Image (cartoon, rainbow, N blue to C red):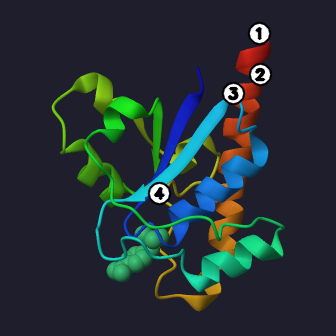
Amino acid sequence: MKTKILMVCLGNICRSPLAEGILKDKLNSKDYFIDSAGTGGYHIGNLPDHRSIAVAKEHGIDILDQRCRKFDIKDFETFDYIYVMDLNNYADIVKLTDNKAYQDKVTLLLQETTQDKKQVPDPYHDDNGFEHVFQLIDEACTIIANNFTKFKED
Ligand code: 4NP
Protein backbone atom coordinates (compact mmCIF):
# COMPACT_ATOMS: atom_id res chain seq x y z
CA MET A 1 0.00 0.00 0.00
CA LYS A 2 1.25 3.43 -0.90
CA THR A 3 1.77 6.09 1.75
CA LYS A 4 -0.54 8.97 0.82
CA ILE A 5 0.52 12.55 1.46
CA LEU A 6 -1.55 15.68 0.78
CA MET A 7 -0.17 19.24 0.60
CA VAL A 8 -2.70 22.00 1.34
CA CYS A 9 -2.72 25.80 0.95
CA LEU A 10 -5.44 28.38 0.28
CA GLY A 11 -5.57 28.60 -3.50
CA ASN A 12 -3.78 25.39 -4.57
CA ILE A 13 -1.99 27.42 -7.23
CA CYS A 14 1.16 28.79 -5.52
CA ARG A 15 2.50 26.93 -2.45
CA SER A 16 0.90 23.48 -2.36
CA PRO A 17 1.59 22.72 -6.06
CA LEU A 18 5.24 23.48 -5.31
CA ALA A 19 5.11 21.23 -2.24
CA GLU A 20 3.52 18.44 -4.30
CA GLY A 21 6.13 18.77 -7.06
CA ILE A 22 9.08 19.02 -4.68
CA LEU A 23 8.09 16.00 -2.56
CA LYS A 24 7.31 13.94 -5.68
CA ASP A 25 10.86 14.73 -6.82
CA LYS A 26 12.26 13.22 -3.58
CA LEU A 27 10.09 10.10 -3.15
CA ASN A 28 9.31 7.30 -5.59
CA SER A 29 5.82 7.04 -7.04
CA LYS A 30 5.75 3.27 -6.52
CA ASP A 31 5.54 3.67 -2.73
CA TYR A 32 4.14 7.19 -2.32
CA PHE A 33 1.03 8.94 -3.64
CA ILE A 34 1.41 12.71 -3.30
CA ASP A 35 -1.29 15.25 -4.14
CA SER A 36 -2.27 18.83 -3.29
CA ALA A 37 -5.47 20.79 -2.70
CA GLY A 38 -6.72 24.22 -1.63
CA THR A 39 -9.05 25.25 1.17
CA GLY A 40 -10.59 27.82 -1.21
CA GLY A 41 -12.28 27.07 -4.52
CA TYR A 42 -11.29 30.14 -6.54
CA HIS A 43 -9.09 28.44 -9.11
CA ILE A 44 -10.53 24.93 -9.56
CA GLY A 45 -9.26 23.25 -12.75
CA ASN A 46 -6.54 25.85 -13.33
CA LEU A 47 -2.84 25.27 -13.82
CA PRO A 48 -0.52 26.31 -10.98
CA ASP A 49 0.40 30.02 -10.90
CA HIS A 50 2.94 30.85 -13.66
CA ARG A 51 5.44 32.01 -11.01
CA SER A 52 5.29 28.63 -9.23
CA ILE A 53 5.69 26.88 -12.60
CA ALA A 54 8.73 29.08 -13.32
CA VAL A 55 10.50 28.65 -9.96
CA ALA A 56 9.92 24.89 -10.04
CA LYS A 57 11.34 24.74 -13.57
CA GLU A 58 14.43 26.71 -12.46
CA HIS A 59 15.03 23.88 -9.98
CA GLY A 60 14.41 21.15 -12.57
CA ILE A 61 10.87 20.26 -11.46
CA ASP A 62 7.92 20.16 -13.87
CA ILE A 63 4.52 20.88 -12.27
CA LEU A 64 2.59 21.41 -15.51
CA ASP A 65 0.59 18.19 -15.01
CA GLN A 66 -1.13 19.66 -11.93
CA ARG A 67 -4.63 21.16 -11.85
CA CYS A 68 -6.15 23.04 -8.94
CA ARG A 69 -8.71 21.27 -6.78
CA LYS A 70 -10.46 22.04 -3.51
CA PHE A 71 -9.87 20.05 -0.33
CA ASP A 72 -12.62 17.45 0.09
CA ILE A 73 -13.79 15.95 3.38
CA LYS A 74 -12.99 12.50 1.88
CA ASP A 75 -9.31 13.53 1.83
CA PHE A 76 -9.23 12.90 5.60
CA GLU A 77 -9.90 9.22 4.91
CA THR A 78 -7.76 8.92 1.77
CA PHE A 79 -4.56 10.53 3.04
CA ASP A 80 -2.21 9.39 5.81
CA TYR A 81 -0.51 12.77 6.20
CA ILE A 82 -1.91 16.23 5.46
CA TYR A 83 0.62 19.07 5.47
CA VAL A 84 -0.68 22.65 5.56
CA MET A 85 1.27 25.78 4.69
CA ASP A 86 -0.08 28.17 7.33
CA LEU A 87 -2.28 28.44 10.41
CA ASN A 88 -5.29 29.65 8.42
CA ASN A 89 -5.12 26.49 6.33
CA TYR A 90 -4.77 24.48 9.55
CA ALA A 91 -7.88 26.05 11.11
CA ASP A 92 -9.90 25.76 7.88
CA ILE A 93 -9.14 22.05 7.53
CA VAL A 94 -9.41 20.98 11.16
CA LYS A 95 -12.82 22.64 11.61
CA LEU A 96 -14.27 20.37 8.90
CA THR A 97 -14.20 17.33 11.18
CA ASP A 98 -14.73 16.35 14.83
CA ASN A 99 -12.77 13.15 14.30
CA LYS A 100 -9.58 13.42 16.39
CA ALA A 101 -7.76 10.80 14.30
CA TYR A 102 -8.43 12.88 11.19
CA GLN A 103 -7.40 16.12 12.89
CA ASP A 104 -4.17 14.47 14.02
CA LYS A 105 -3.23 13.86 10.37
CA VAL A 106 -2.89 17.62 9.86
CA THR A 107 0.52 19.25 10.50
CA LEU A 108 2.15 22.55 9.59
CA LEU A 109 4.68 21.69 6.86
CA LEU A 110 7.44 23.77 8.47
CA GLN A 111 6.89 22.02 11.81
CA GLU A 112 9.38 19.52 10.40
CA THR A 113 12.10 22.19 10.14
CA THR A 114 14.14 24.33 12.53
CA GLN A 115 12.75 27.53 10.95
CA ASP A 116 11.68 30.05 13.63
CA LYS A 117 8.54 30.88 11.69
CA LYS A 118 6.49 27.76 11.05
CA GLN A 119 4.27 29.19 8.31
CA VAL A 120 5.04 29.27 4.58
CA PRO A 121 4.16 32.87 3.58
CA ASP A 122 1.53 33.34 0.90
CA PRO A 123 3.48 34.62 -2.15
CA TYR A 124 0.40 35.42 -4.28
CA HIS A 125 0.89 39.20 -3.99
CA ASP A 126 4.72 39.07 -3.91
CA ASP A 127 6.47 38.37 -7.22
CA ASN A 128 9.79 38.08 -5.39
CA GLY A 129 8.57 35.64 -2.77
CA PHE A 130 8.54 32.49 -4.84
CA GLU A 131 12.22 31.51 -4.53
CA HIS A 132 12.02 31.95 -0.72
CA VAL A 133 8.86 29.85 -0.62
CA PHE A 134 10.56 27.20 -2.77
CA GLN A 135 13.50 27.05 -0.35
CA LEU A 136 11.29 26.75 2.75
CA ILE A 137 9.21 23.97 1.21
CA ASP A 138 12.29 22.21 -0.13
CA GLU A 139 13.89 22.16 3.34
CA ALA A 140 10.77 20.61 4.87
CA CYS A 141 10.35 18.08 2.05
CA THR A 142 13.97 16.96 2.34
CA ILE A 143 13.39 16.19 6.04
CA ILE A 144 10.05 14.47 5.37
CA ALA A 145 11.52 12.33 2.58
CA ASN A 146 14.53 11.36 4.72
CA ASN A 147 12.27 10.42 7.64
CA PHE A 148 10.04 8.25 5.45
CA THR A 149 13.00 6.55 3.82
CA LYS A 150 14.72 5.89 7.15
CA PHE A 151 11.48 4.60 8.65
CA LYS A 152 11.07 2.15 5.76
CA GLU A 153 14.61 0.84 6.17
CA ASP A 154 14.26 0.20 9.94
P1 4NP B 1 -1.68 29.71 -2.46
O1 4NP B 1 -1.73 31.27 -2.84
O2 4NP B 1 -2.62 29.54 -1.28
O3 4NP B 1 -0.26 29.48 -2.08
O4 4NP B 1 -2.12 28.97 -3.70
C1 4NP B 1 -2.91 31.94 -3.16
C2 4NP B 1 -3.44 31.84 -4.43
C3 4NP B 1 -4.59 32.52 -4.76
C4 4NP B 1 -5.21 33.31 -3.81
C5 4NP B 1 -4.69 33.39 -2.54
C6 4NP B 1 -3.54 32.71 -2.21
N1 4NP B 1 -6.39 34.04 -4.15
O5 4NP B 1 -6.90 34.79 -3.29
O6 4NP B 1 -6.88 33.91 -5.27
- Quadrant position of the C terminus in the picture: top right
Measured from the top left, where is residue 100 in percent x and y?
A: 25, 25
The alpha-carbon separation of the residues under discs 1 and 2 comes to 6 Å
Query: Which kind of residue does numbered mark 1 sit on?
Result: Asp
For image coordinates 34% across by 56% down, the residue present is: 89
CA neighbours of label 1 inside 10 A, class few (<14), some (14 to 19), many (20+): few
Measured from the top left, where is residue 26 in percent x and y?
A: 77, 45
Measured from the top left, where is residue 74 in percent x and y?
A: 29, 38
For image coordinates 71% across by 81% down, the residue present is: 54
On residue 150, the disc is: 2
**Label 2 close to label 3 by CB (< 8 Å):** yes
Position above or below: 91 against 55? above
Choose mark 4 or mark 3, whichever is in front.
3
* Residue at image mark 1: 154
**Ligand 1: image quarter:** bottom left
CA neighbours of label 4 inside 10 A, class few (<14), some (14 to 19), many (20+): many
How many numbered badges does the structure rendering display? 4
**Label 4 close to label 1 by CB (< 8 Å):** no
SS for dot 3: helix
* Residue at image mark 3: 148
Position above or below: 82 against 104? below
**Label 4 close to label 2 by CB (< 8 Å):** no
Asked whether, in this view, residue 82 is left or right of residue 61, the answer is: left
CA neighbours of label 2 inside 10 A, class few (<14), some (14 to 19), many (20+): few
For image coordinates 37% across by 76% down, the residue present is: 43
Position above or below: 83 against 3? below
Asked whether, in this view, residue 39 is left or right of residue 114, the answer is: left
The alpha-carbon separation of the residues under discs 3 and 1 comes to 10 Å
The alpha-carbon separation of the residues under discs 4 and 2 comes to 24 Å
CA neighbours of label 3 inside 10 A, class few (<14), some (14 to 19), many (20+): few
* Residue at image mark 4: 85
Residue that extends furthest to the left in the rendered view of this protein: 98
